[in-house]
Image: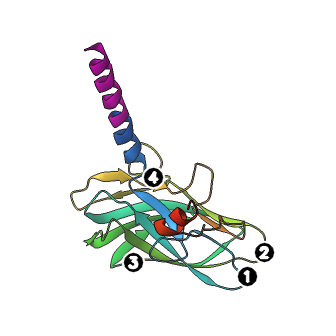
Amino acid sequence: MKKLALALALTLVALAGTASAADWFANNVGIYFDEAATSNCGTVAPMTPFAGYLVFTQMTAADINAWEIQLNYNNVTKLSFMPRGVHVMISPRPGEAMVGLATPAPVVGGSFVAADLQLVVLNPNPAGIFANGVFFHLLDIQVPAYTNSQDVAYELHPISPPGSPIMTINNGCAIDVEVDSFGAVKSLFR
């Protein structure tokens, strides 16, 4: 009986840990080279404008009504920043954007493309874009955030560890590994 109680207690602790860890991976924010939010690291030639997309992924709300973020650019120049949809944007301080949408926008497949960016690097040196909260922030803590149509506020979590860029340029990227089918892997052991 003691073994069963211990097993149940360990299972409950493991499940509780999983639930709290899962919350951290929801409501993410990143800047990507594509709207599908698949690549936030790449190599770009100097003086060649390129597109970036501010995308919120794994969102827990069904819609979005407003959002706020501060973007800091390291060795990359922002040529333009255009939030999507009919909106009102205020930028009380450099790099900050506080955006209210005219009507709540639906979250599709857990993602929302918040803004289109036009960027350029001036040299081949490593560059990056970092996300922070705005000075006059919505939540009790200074972090990127959004609200839904019921004015419930959610924290946005940068896709990279603290102090790391949410978009990395000319700084080496992890190389994708080749994906094999299960049959090809099995054939290695025949």
| Tag 2 and tag 1, C-beta contact below 8 Å | yes
Whether the residues at callouts 3 and 4 have beta carbons within 8 Å, the answer is: no
- Front: mark 3 or 2: 2
Mark 4 or mark 2: which comes first in sequence?
2
State how far apart marks 1 and 4 are (Cα): 36 Å
* Residue drawn at point x = 30 percent, y = 30 percent: 12
Q: What stretch is highlighted in magenta?
A: 1-15
Q: Looking at the picture, which amino acid does disc 4 mark?
A: Phe
- Which residue in the structure is indicated by mark 1? 45
Residue 181 appears anywhere in the view? no
Q: Residues within 10 Å of mark 1 (few under 14, many from 20)?
A: some
State the residue position of label 2: 124
Task: Give the SS element for disc 1.
Answer: loop
**Residue at coordinates 44% horizontally, 58% vertically from top-left?**
28
- Camera-near label (3 vs 4) is 3
* Quarter occupied by the N terminus: top left
Mark 3 or mark 4: name the one nearer the start of the chain. Answer: 3
Q: What residue type is labelled 2?
A: Pro
Q: Is residue 11 above or below residue 56?
A: above
Whole-angstrom CA distance, mark 4 to mark 2, is 35 Å
Q: Quadrant of residue 17?
A: top left
How many tags in the picture? Answer: 4
Residue that label 3 marks: 84
Say which quarter of the image contains residue 47.
bottom right
x, y percentage for residue 162? 58, 48
Q: Is the magenta stretch mostly helix, strand or loop?
A: helix
